Amino acid sequence: MQLAVDVGENALTERQKDVLDAALALLVEAGDALTMTSVARRASCSKESLYKWFGDRDGLLTATVQWQASKVRAVPVNPEAFNLASLTAGLQRFASDWLHVLSGTISVALNRVAVGHAGSDKHDLGVIVLENGPFAMARRLKPLLQLGRDTGLLHFNETDEAFRTFFGLVVRDVQIRLLLGDRLELTDASIERDSLRATQQFLALYGAQTEAAEGGH
Amino acid sequence: MQLAVDVGENALTERQKDVLDAALALLVEAGDALTMTSVARRASCSKESLYKWFGDRDGLLTATVQWQASKVRAVPVNPEAFNLASLTAGLQRFASDWLHVLSGTISVALNRVAVGHAGSDKHDLGVIVLENGPFAMARRLKPLLQLGRDTGLLHFNETDEAFRTFFGLVVRDVQIRLLLGDRLELTDASIERDSLRATQQFLALYGAQTEAAEGGH
DNA sequence: CCACTGCCGTAACGTACGGTACGGTACGGC
DNA sequence: GCCGTACCGTACCGTACGTTACGGCAGTGG
């Protein structure tokens, strides 16, 4: 018996995690053209073990996506001294993190696979990526937004609407262009710039000081 | 010899257009699992003809995507009496059209296939969808934005930045959620509401009357 | 030393599907 | 009437890949 992490239902041995990392790498390289044989070769394991551990190809893909999702559990920001500066910083850091994840090769590859599978009967991958992508982002951001509203720094009725506007201002056409194969290299500098712009635009729309703060561009 | 439309390089006979419509329908139903045999059966044509007309499977998919793209050539809005009302109406109509297309089953299916293929060697579909999706939207919208700037109704430095912000405000997380299989039904009413909201938010950010027009929400 | 277990490596099986070949039919020109 | 062309329907071929089966090897417990 090897060491195993307990993640809810599924407990993965270290060996299995190595296999899933190999699958992840192949998913980045070859996309959905990944074959069971290639995973076995890359991970130096037998196909018999793959089927024993993950059931079938879909099970392997599902486990791979979940494994990646379990790795990116983000640290929740929870400032006690809350003011406009910390709200702004929180939003901007959030936007920056999100753009970094979004433009990473792993995120692009997983989203591609999940999107492709959402078209056929197997909706599992789409749901998982949805749950660990946009929905997770919403769950993480909404407390910050509500804190902003409670402290009078933000004005909005529906938290979800505010979140989705922020999402749009941050992501814009970046994700769909990356998924469609557009060369669109985001440098750290451009991400910081975009995060700042999105945050300021969001504050201009939902901030309490809308009239005062935004003079001319 | 049948009647043929001349679309640049490729001239499609009526028969071939029917075949591509059948392929389109199957793409919506089965996604990338579409087979040459299924297309032949649905269109009541022989596989031999498919290969003769389109070369191979990728050629068929490419022709199908281009055929759909050729059908959605939109009417360019070109108002001569230009003021804030017509700018607002133009933006809102634009947003509404775009959301309607985006949430259609055909758009979702084609984007799914193109995204899937962008992961492998064949980037053609991704480029085509990119060209007829976001890029076409940009080409259509930018004249309106520049007209708005020239008449002093809008303030921005980079037209592209303004466009991408509008894109984000309109699309938000709708497209990625649809592609990932999220049930997210957009009614005509909700689309009109979102178009109005996005337009007003855009005007609040880039409109000349930013300080005056936006009191409270 | 010996069973047992877990796993690797590889061979083998079944099938689905892309691509090709071929017979049969309708039609227009000569 | 005869030929060429275009096309349908179907049978066929080759291959890739998911899945299964099997032989061998290392570690462990008795």
Image: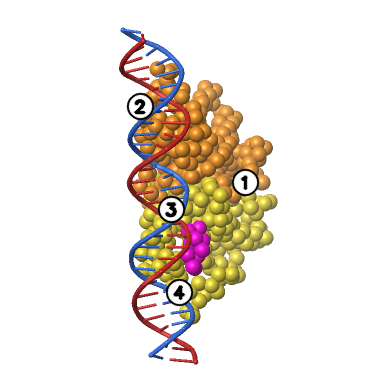
Chain colours: A yellow, B orange, C blue, D red
Q: Are marks 2 and 4 on the same chain?
A: no
Residue D9 screen position, x and y as percent: 47, 31
Give the left or right position of residue A212, taking residue A185 as reference.
right
Q: Are marks 3 and 1 on the same chain?
A: no
Mark number displayed over residue B184: 1
Residue drawn where x is 62% and y is 48% of the image: B183
The boundaries of the magenta stretch are A51-60
Give the Cα separation between the discs numbered 3 and 1.
Answer: 26 Å
Nearer the camera: disc 2 or disc 4? 4
Give the Cα separation between the discs numbered 2 and 4.
Answer: 56 Å
- Badge 1 marks a residue whose secondary structure is loop
Q: Main secondary structure of the magenta part?
A: helix
Residue D19 screen position, x and y as percent: 48, 60
> Which residue is at the front of the view, B102 or A199?
B102
**Which of the chains bears the disc numbered 2?**
B
- Badge 2 marks a residue whose secondary structure is loop
Q: Are marks 3 and 1 in contact (CB under 8 Å)?
A: no
Amino acid at pointer 4 = Glu
Amino acid at pointer 1 = Leu
Give the Cα separation between the discs numbered 2 and 1.
Answer: 38 Å
Mark number displayed over residue A14: 4
Res B149 visible: no
Mark number displayed over residue B9: 2
Q: Are marks 3 and 4 on the same chain?
A: yes
